[in-house]
Image (cartoon, grey):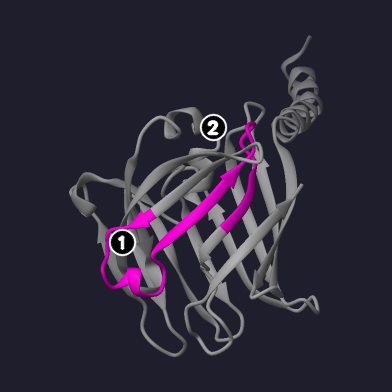
Amino acid sequence: MKIKDLNQLYRGILPAVALLLSLNLFAAEKTSLYTGVATKEGKTIYIEKHEVAENEKGDVLRAKTTYSTPEDKVIATLTSDFAQSITNAEHEMHDLRTERRYGVRWKNGQAYMWDKKTDKKEEREEIGKDFADGKLVIGGQGLHYYMRSRLKEFAKKEVAIAILIPGKLDWYSFLVVPAGEEKGLLKFVMKTQSAILRLFAPKLEVWYSPEGKLMRYRGLSNLSDDKGNNQNVEITYTY
């Protein structure tokens, strides 16, 4: 076969090979959906719609949470990319009510918190190697995706963690304490080590199914109320 003919053959084959590879990569991912309904004093105050991309092993790759009012008006979004870290994912919280954005970014293997208030310059805080006294650093929804495949480990002992608060460029120390079973669900209590935080959120509680699905949450919301104040909620999840 002549060189010219070979070149034509390759030009015909390569697009087909590229298409097959892209289809294989796409097939290796799966998307799952679940919903959370947040209530306060028995009244629904917002709804979470979760979209999660996972690989064929079940490891999370990306996630997006859309927050809406009971009237289905979108008020905030949270996007996460777990390529750099499961516990401390690169993420962005965008509050559409105020256009404020904050989260965690990774650059050259280094993570930092950032906060961008409306019409103000972005502020940053680096997360160094000695950050939070060596505790497990949690950013965004990292704790959930880390815990769900390690429930047996968490059920055996207390775990010290540092939860990032990018909107304040700060962090709070918590202790994740196993609290046994409740109606067939594994319960965990997260107790804050901060005296200030204990004033309005003394503890957070989560309930998991044995297979690792988050079924219920009670405690401080990552979404402020319409006046910008912290709020405590109870969230029930359906799949």
Compared to residue 60, the image places residue 127 above or below, namely: below
Q: Position of residue 164 (x, y in %)?
A: 36, 60
Q: Nearer the viewer, residue 160 or 189?
A: 189
- Identify the image quadrant of residue 172: bottom left
Mark 1 lies on a secondary structure that is strand
Q: Which residue is mark 1?
A: 172
Q: Position of residue 234 (x, y in %)?
A: 61, 64
Q: Which residue is mark 2?
A: 149
Identity of the residue furthest to the top in this view: 1
* Magenta highlight on residue 66: no
Q: Position of residue 182 (x, y in %)?
A: 60, 42
User: Does residue 68 appear to the left or right of 158 in the view shown?
Assistant: right
Q: Which residues are magenta?
A: 191-217
User: Does residue 105 appear to the left or right of 81 in the view shown?
Assistant: left
Residue plotted at (56% across, 82% down): 225
Mark 2 lies on a secondary structure that is loop
Which mark identifies residue 42? none
* Magenta highlight on residue 194: yes
Q: Nearer the viewer, residue 8 or 191?
A: 191
Residue plotted at (28% across, 73% down): 196
Q: Is the N terminus in the top left, top right, bottom left or bottom right quadrant?
A: top right
Compared to residue 33, the image places residue 4 above or below, namely: above
